[in-house]
């Protein structure tokens, strides 16, 4: 009963958060797309795509191993686990920032990437915020309501400032800076909250424990890297092979779909610690729960997909303006991607990982990355923003079908 009450509270908190995020995004994303225009919005999206790699290497896989460790530990062990993962992320922040910063400087010298250093600095603040805001901690102790409150406060302050100060295409650096402030502000608030609720929680770094944390998260990191290779690399390659305007067209469609995908991932994040416990306590109950979740996703995803497919030619010009007519087809191509991703999250994130199938999970994602890297360049060269959308759809179908077949063969979930 306690598990179920905690799960319901966590899901409600995350849905509340995403619901308010949708409301704010519904106001903010079209506003920024209109005010900045495809070219400058594309420049911001490209730079945010570059900075994703910083966050990816700094997260390292701790986003899954830390909540799992916290969900299974005793109250007395919480400070040790928090300190281990927090120090690990701080170490990575310094190492990765220096390494990637030098790499970007080198690529800009060779004119492989045209780097706007002011824009990069503005977006980089989100990397520091990512380290300061330990979502993994609240997820692990199953207290998602704190994330809800903190995130809403940070996001509201950021968005109010954007509406007040971003009024022309020339304000694109300021727009990027104010968006990057959200995790930074949320991080400051969350650390104050954690310090008050758990006095003395941050202990001296224990190198042995940190080394163990890196070792246990390595397989997850490989999986996350593989996912990023076919989700984030696409937009970076699009920017390198075309221009910021084309990136803007694709981003117009992608940002709208991301609202749906964020909602799905919020539910998955809330369920993950619960389902990890359930697999340990009662395997059959865990499977029954996942099957019900799969049915809900199939029903909602199919109805929602049809609405997007039919409505996008009307919604995009109304919401984003006539400059984004080129965003309609990418959106239609990716209509059912949220549903496909939702199913693969159940198969991989919620089933394979709690059952200790990390190696198989990461291999499937690595194969998907290879497939994506093979098809992405020719698709971009021939179809530009539509080609990226095709690559995304093909790759996500491959991931979901492969995971489904594997679980079917092992008589898990699908039989």
Image: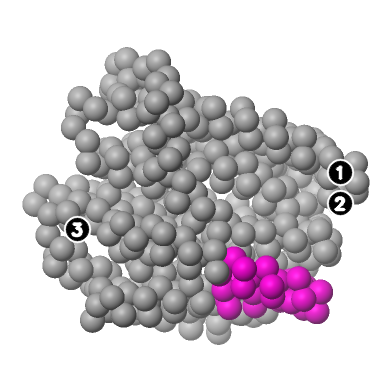
Left or right: 30 as drawn, with respect to 198? right
Q: Is the residue 327 above or below the residue 192 in the image? A: below
Report which residue position mark 2 lands on: 112
Marks 2/1: CA–CA distance: 6 Å
The residue furthest right is: 110
* Number of numbered discs: 3
Q: Nearer the viewer, residue 158 or 217?
A: 217
| Residue 115 image position (x, y, % from top left) | 83, 44
Magenta includes 376? yes
Magenta includes 282? no
| Residue 87 image position (x, y, % from top left) | 46, 26
Marks 3/1: CA–CA distance: 49 Å
- Say whether disc 2 or disc 3 marks the residue closer to the N-terminus: 2
Give the residue drawn at x 79%, y 47%: 168
Left or right: 298 as drawn, with respect to 25? left
Where are the magenta residues, as a range?
A: 368-395
Give the residue drawn at x 25%, y 53%: 276
Q: Residues within 10 Å of mark 1 (few under 14, many from 20)?
A: some
Report which residue position mark 1 lands on: 108
Asked whether disc 2 touches disc 1, contact meaning CB atoms under 8 Å apart, the reply is yes
Report which residue position mark 3 lands on: 279
């Amino acid at each position: 009963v306690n598990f179920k009450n905690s799960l319901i509270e966590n899901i409600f908190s995350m849905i509340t958060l995403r619901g308010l995020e949708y409301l704010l995004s519904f106001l903010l994303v079209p506003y920024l797309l209109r005010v900045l225009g495809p070219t400058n919005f594309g420049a911001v999206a490209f730079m945010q795509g570059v900075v994703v790699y910083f966050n990816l290497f700094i997260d390292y896989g701790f986003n899954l191993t830390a909540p799992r460790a916290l969900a299974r530990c005793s109250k007395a062990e919480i400070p040790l686990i928090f300190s281990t993962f927090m120090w690990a992320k701080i170490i990575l922040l310094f190492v990765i920032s220096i390494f990637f910063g030098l790499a970007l400087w080198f690529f800009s010298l060779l004119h492989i990437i045209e780097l706007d250093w002011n824009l990069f600095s503005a977006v980089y603040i989100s990397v520091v915020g990512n380290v300061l805001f330990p979502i993994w901690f609240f997820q692990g102790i199953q207290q998602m309501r704190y994330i809800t409150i903190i995130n809403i406060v940070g996001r509201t302050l950021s968005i109010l400032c954007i509406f007040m100060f971003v009024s022309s295409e020339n304000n694109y650096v300021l727009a990027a800076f104010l968006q990057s402030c959200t995790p930074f502000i949320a991080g400051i608030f969350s650390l104050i909250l954690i310090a008050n609720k758990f006095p003395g929680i941050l202990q001296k770094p224990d190198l042995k424990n940190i080394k163990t944390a890196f070792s246990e998260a390595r397989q997850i990191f490989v999986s996350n890297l593989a996912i990023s290779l076919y989700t984030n690399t696409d937009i970076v390659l699009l920017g390198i092979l075309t221009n910021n305007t084309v990136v803007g067209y694709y981003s117009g469609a992608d940002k709208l779909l991301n609202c749906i995908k964020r909602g799905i991932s919020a539910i998955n994040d809330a369920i993950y610690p619960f389902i990890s416990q359930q697999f340990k306590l009662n395997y059959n109950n865990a499977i029954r729960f996942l099957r019900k979740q799969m049915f809900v996703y199939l029903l909602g995803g199919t109805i929602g997909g049809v609405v997007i497919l039919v409505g996008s030619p009307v919604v995009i010009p109304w919401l984003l303006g006539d400059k984004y007519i080129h965003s309609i087809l990418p959106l239609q191509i990716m209509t059912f991607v949220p549903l496909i991703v939702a199913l693969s999250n159940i198969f991989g994130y919620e089933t394979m990982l709690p059952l200790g199938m990390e190696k198989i999970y990461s291999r499937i994602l690595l194969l998907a990355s290879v497939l994506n890297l093979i098809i992405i360049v020719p698709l971009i060269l021939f179809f530009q923003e539509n080609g990226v959308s095709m690559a995304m759809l093909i790759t996500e179908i491959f991931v979901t079908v492969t995971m489904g077949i594997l679980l079917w063969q092992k008589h898990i979930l699908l039989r």
